[in-house]
Amino acid sequence: MCGIFGYVGKKNCVPFLIEGLKKLEYRGYDSAGIAVLNDKEKIEMIKKEGRISTLEKNLGTINGRCGIGHTRWATHGKPSDENSHPHQSGKFVLVHNGIIENYLDLKIELVNSGVKFISQTDSEVIAHLCNREYKGNMLETISKITKLLKGSYALAIICEDYPNTIFVTKKDNPLIIGIGDKENYVSSDVLAIASHTNEAFILNDFEIAIVTNDSISIFDKNLKKFKKNHSKINVSNNDCGMGQNESYMLKEIKEIPKALKKTFDYYLTKEFDKNLLKILKKMSSINIVACGTAYHAGICGKYVVEELCRIPVSVNIASEFRYSSPIIDKKSLTIAISQSGETADTLAALKLAKASGSKTIAITNVPTSSITQIADFVLPMLAGPEIAVAATKSYNTQLAVLYMLALKIRELRKKIKLDKYIQCIKEIPLLAENMIKKASILNELAGKVSNVQNVFFLGRNLDYAVALEGSLKLKEISYIHSEGYPAGELKHGTLALIEKNIFVIVLITQKKLIEKSLNALHEVKAREANILLITGFEELKENSGADNMILIPKTLDLFMPILSVIPLQIFAYYMARAKGNDPDKPRNLAKSVTVE
């Protein structure tokens, strides 16, 4: 959730730090700061609550060739200048991503020994531990303090005794080291270094690195130096820019057709891992673990896999999975879905499943992420960088991967040709493009209903899965209360909330459920609700009773969720705009949730 960026080289580090932090803004933050080791080998630090632009206005003459920066999303302690990172103690200054679960015990111990705290954060504890444990050797100091910490961390540390040097280490939070020409970079996100280099070291848990302008030395948890292979970063500057669009979210919605085509083409031309194929043939059940949008993709995946393959699938909110005594064995397969590949709860759930003997698959958009280091197999989404906090194209490509996996399982187990499905898949990107062309209608509708206080999304089966995601999108960026419900549950309590002019969005894309879903529509219409119908059935235009209707291009019913979610994404976007909100940076939310 927070962001780390560091630079060490021959140039003034401050412009690099500010640029790097701006590249991390999309992750969500409430304050920012930098610390620089100046030419006199003394630490200078500036940190401010609010946007990076506020920090920029207060930089003064701060200058140096080595520095670290941070964007903070508050966990311990409210947003303030004092609680912002970096944190300093004596000759040490550091930035921290993660949560230290035993920080209060450590803080009490430090306070009792005479240490004075400036902030209310857990992170300041680490700075004071550095100062207490330091005996002249930084590697030994880092090793000592990290053994005292319970929780998660990614740390970048500067010490006045080590000119032009950044020390880094991590556990359960991402940290990478970008390899430059007589300059090197530290970051929590590949997007922040993509404009400087396409080569990086991806740190594993408990590894420690010493980064200078002309060297990167990496040590294991026993402080033994070893040679580590670097990774290629395949992110272009064009992918990260907004282009001619008014926001990243709108740009990313427009990129859905391209992302779908790229993802489908990848799986249509690439063979699955042979070892994975053996597992897919023999597994008895599937557990899907995910959070938020990825969880909703998993619900859709459950319906698809069970219909095509007749294999039982359970979908679990990752934050609940670890604490629910899940039934996992060697015959089950666990699929973890995470756009960033860094979602803390999903990573924890994946580790538990693996420790219980389950084979594991990661579906992720970031090939260098932590989840790829844990899972037995990786099925990539090819959505390209997603900057807006609210997920759009990543949801569509998560669905694409789940569909391709389901079809592969069906082919392996049922020995049935997939011709009609493959033809459908090849047509979907163009159909998605046609769907996006309806944006102006949704913009006009949003302008008319933007003052509503509550919105209900109704659907059955696959339409219910999409209703959940449509509801999440709306509440995330418009701040309007909304709920997604199975249409059949409406009369079991929720109907009490339906009254005149309540806005209801009804999804009807499954032919076998038209009549049943229309029942729910008529029930809310009888209470004088204002209804938007999302459907692929043109014949409903005349007799549904809906106030407005968006017609989706027809494809096989099973694949309709990839298309039916698009108008809901667009509608949420324009509702946010109509209310004056920034859809790219919704309040209180972060793109990558790296803390539990």
Image (spheres, rainbow, N blue to C red):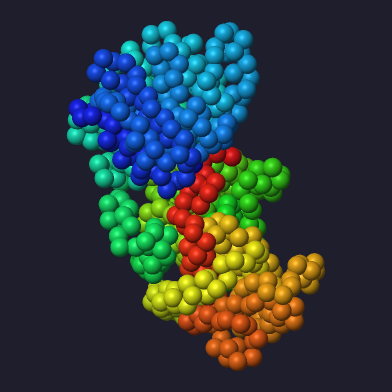
**Between 36 and 171, the one nearer to me in the picture:** 36
Q: Quadrant of the C terminus?
A: top right
The image shows residue 576 at horizontal and vertical percentages of 51, 61
Q: Residue at x 34, y 63 (%)?
A: 245
Residue 518 visible to the viewer = yes
- Quadrant of residue 502 in the image? bottom right
Q: Residue at x 53, y 35 (%)?
A: 79
Number of marks drawn: 0
**465, above or below 593, in the image:** below
- Quadrant of residue 489 in the image? bottom right
The image shows residue 154 at horizontal and vertical percentages of 45, 31
Q: Residue at x 39, y 75 (%)?
A: 433
Residue 274 visible to the viewer = no
**162, above or below 30, in the image:** above
**Between 428 and 269, the one nearer to me in the picture:** 428
The image shows residue 17 at horizontal and vertical percentages of 32, 35
Q: Residue at x 49, y 59 (%)?
A: 580
Lateral position of residue 250 relative to residue 172, left or right: left
**Between 120 and 176, the one nearer to me in the picture:** 120
- Quadrant of residue 7 in the image? top left
The image shows residue 339 at horizontal and vertical percentages of 47, 52
**Between 428 and 69, the one nearer to me in the picture:** 69
